[in-house]
Amino acid sequence: MTTQKLGACYYPEQWPAALWAEDAARMKAMGLSYVRIGEFAWSRLEPRPGVYEFNWLREAIDTLHAAGLDVVLGTPTATPPKWLVDAMPDMLARDAEGRPRKFGSRRHYCFSHEGYGRECDRIVTRLAEEFGAHPGLAAWQTDNEYGCHDTVESYSDAALLAFRKWCRTKYGSIEALNAAWGNVFWSMEVTDFDSIDLPNLTVTEANPAHLLDFRRFSSDQVAAFNRRQVEIIRNHSPGRPILHNFMGAFTAFDHFAVSRDLDAASWDSYPLGFLERSANDDAFKARYMRVGDPDFQAFHHDLYRGCGRGRWWVMEQQPGPVNWAPWNPAPARGAVRMWTFEAFAAGAETVSYFRWRQAPFAQEQMHEALLLPNSEANEACHDVETIARELASLNARVETKRADVLLIFDYESEWAWKIQPQGRDFSYFELVLHFYRGLRRAGLSVDIGPPDAETVRDRKLVLLPGLFAASDAFVDALAKSAALVLTGPRSGSKTSDFQIPPGLPPGALRKLIDLRVRRVESLRPGVLIGAETGHFERWREFLILGEDVECVIASGEAECALARHGKHCYLAGWPDETLLDAVLSKLFEEAGVEAAPPPRDIRIRDNGGLRYVFNYGPEPVDVSSLVGGANLLLGDRTLPPCGVAAFQLAERRK
Ligand code: GAL
C-alpha cells in the first residue's frame, strides 16, 4: 500500500534553465511529488542524427531531484524530428485516402514502419542507458497517447506488407481466409496473401471481416511498438514502473493488451473538454459545463484500473480551460479538487496536472495550466495546495478491493459495432457507459474488465451488454461462476470471424441460456418500444425462448424484453433509463448486491474502508443518510456544489 501522490507535467526544454530551480522549489512547496518530463523533446535530445545532447536533461532531472521531486521520464517517440522524417519520408503514416500525414504537429509516424521502429529503439536505448539508474528517475512513460489524432490506422505500404504477413500468420492458408471472411460474396476471393489489400477506398463498404481484421492488426501493431520500448527500458532501468498515458473515449486499439506489458496504466482526464466533445444533449452540457459529466471520469478510472490490474494513475488532469474542445469553459470553483478526489477514491496512485506553466507559444497557448505564462499562480494552484494538505491529513492509501459487480468492456466489440452499427446510434461505448451510469445511480462501486475467466472470478453480478463474440473459454468461465449474469442486447451475435453463428445469436452464449434471436430492428431517435416498466430505444430484438427459459419482463407486444434461465438473463434491446433501472434493481436483489441510490448529482465511491461522496450538482445536499453514523474524515455532511466528503466506514489499518 502506498500513499496517494500529486504531480505535474513539465517541459524544461520550453523554459530558460534559470527558471528550473525556482519551478522545482514551488512544485515541492505546493505538495507535488512527481514531475513528468521529456515526452516531446526529441529535437532537443538529438538535434542532428547521432548527435545527442543529454546534458540539459540531466541538469533538469538533477534540479528536480535536488528539490525532492521524483521524475517520470517520457520517451520522445510521439514527435519524430524533421531530420528523421526527411531521411525516411515513408515513415509517415497515411490516412484512409492514402495521403501522407505531414510533419508540423505530432504523431506523424506509422506503427508498421520498421525503419522508424529501429530509430525508436535507438533513442529509447540511449535514454535508458543514460538516465535509467538516475536516483531521481522514478518511473517511465512510453511515447504519448498512442492513437491520438486518429493515428492508430495507417494505410501506408509498410502497413500493407505487415498486414499481409499478419493475415498469413493468422490463417495459414488463403482458403481459410477466404472462408473466414466469406469472400465468395461479391467475388471478393483472393488467391494468395500478396493480393490482399487494405480495406480503404473501396467503392462501397468493405467486407466487415476484412475491416475487423485490419483493426485487430492495427491494434497489435500498437502493442508491439509499445513492447519494444518496454523491453529496452526494463533492461536498462529495472525496478522503475513503466506506464503509458491512455485517453478518454478512445478505443482504436486494445488497451488491455497494451497494458499487459506495462506495470501500471494511466490516462489523461479532461472532464470539460470531453463533455463538450461528447454526444450528450445541450441541456446536459449546460448543466455540467463546469464540472464535467459526473460518470465519464469515473468510468475511465475503473476501466484503467482494470487495464493496470489494480495499478493506475491520472497522468494528465485538466486544471483550467483547455484549447481543443468546441467550447472551452473554465472549471467551477472546487471542480479540480473534486476530480482529483474522484480519482483517488477510485484507487489512483497519482494524479498529475497538465501542465505546470501555460505555454505562451505554439498550438496549446490557450490551454491553461497551474501557472500563468508569466509564472503567476493560476486558480488551480490553490486547489492543489488544499488537496495536498487534505491528502496528508487523510493519509489516504491505495487500496482497491475486488468489486462485487463487474461490467465487461471489450475493445473488439467496439470495433465490430462501429463497422456494422446497423442503426446509426448503436454505439458500444455508449451502451456500456449507459449501463455504468445505471450502476452509479444505484450508488455502487464497480470494476470494469475484459471478457476473461480471471476477471469474472469471485463476482456476484456480471454484465456484458453488446459483447460481439463470446469465446468458449469465457462462456465456460461464466457457466462455472456463481455470479448472476446479464447478457444482451446483441451479445454473442457473431462468431469471431464476423459471421452470424450457425445456431443463431446469441451464439456460444446459448450454452448459458437457451434462446434464439430471430430478428433485430434498429429504431430512429424518438421511437420507443414499451416494456412492462420503461422502454427500449435505439435497438430491439425478437426472441424465441427455449422450454426452460422464463420471460421475466414482457414488452407490450407479446415479445420478451428480459429472459431468464437460472442465473443467466438476456436483455432483448437497448433499455432506456427506467427499464435499465428496473432490470438492474431486480438483479441486485437476487445477487445480494447492496444498492444505495444517492440523490441526483451525488456520486458515491467506496475504497479502502472509506466512503467518498461527491456533489456534481448546483445545490448543497445533505448526504447524512448515505453514510449512517460513519465518522466524517473530510468535508461536511452538507455537501456544497463540487463538495467532497470522506467517511470512515470500517476500522482502517494504520
Ligand atoms: C493530451 C496530450 C498533451 C496535451 C493535452 C492538452 O492529449 O497528451 O500533450 O496535448 O492533451 O489537453
Image: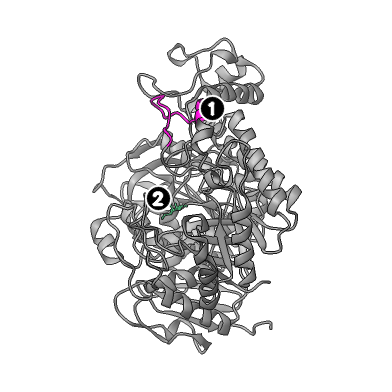
Indicate the quadrant containing the N terminus: top left, top right, bottom left or bottom right. bottom right
Residue holding disc 2:
430
Tell me how far mark 1 sits from mark 2, CA to CA: 40 Å
User: Picture coordinates of residue 582 (x, y %)?
Assistant: 40, 62
User: Picture coordinates of residue 218 (x, y %)?
Assistant: 54, 34
Q: Toward the viewer: 137 or 582?
A: 137
Tag 1: residue type? Met
In this picture, is 176 found above or below 16? Answer: above
Q: Residue at x 55, y 79 (%)?
A: 391
Q: Toward the viewer: 636 or 529?
A: 636
Q: Residue at x 25, y 63 (%)?
A: 286
Task: Work out whether mark 1 precedes mark 2 in sequence or the reverse, and give the earlier one.
Answer: 1
Q: Which residues are magenta?
A: 86-103
Residue holding disc 1:
88
Q: Residue at x 59, y 61 (%)?
A: 60
User: SS for tag 1?
Assistant: loop
User: Picture coordinates of residue 513 (x, y %)?
Assistant: 55, 46
User: Picture coordinates of residue 150 (x, y %)?
Assistant: 43, 39
Residue 494 visible in the displayed image: no
Q: Toward the viewer: 172 or 315?
A: 315
Mark 2 crowd level (few <14, some 14–19, many ≥20, 10 Å Cα): some
Foreground mark, 1 or 2, reads 1
The image's mark for residue 233 is: none
Q: Residue at x 54, y 33 (%)?
A: 84
Indicate the quadrant containing the C terminus: top left, top right, bottom left or bottom right. bottom right
* Residue 90 covered by magenta stretch: yes
Mark 1 crowd level (few <14, some 14–19, many ≥20, 10 Å Cα): few
In this picture, is 23 found above or below 308? Answer: below
Q: Toward the viewer: 630 or 568?
A: 630
Tag 2: residue type? Glu
What secondary structure is the magenta-colored segment mainly? loop
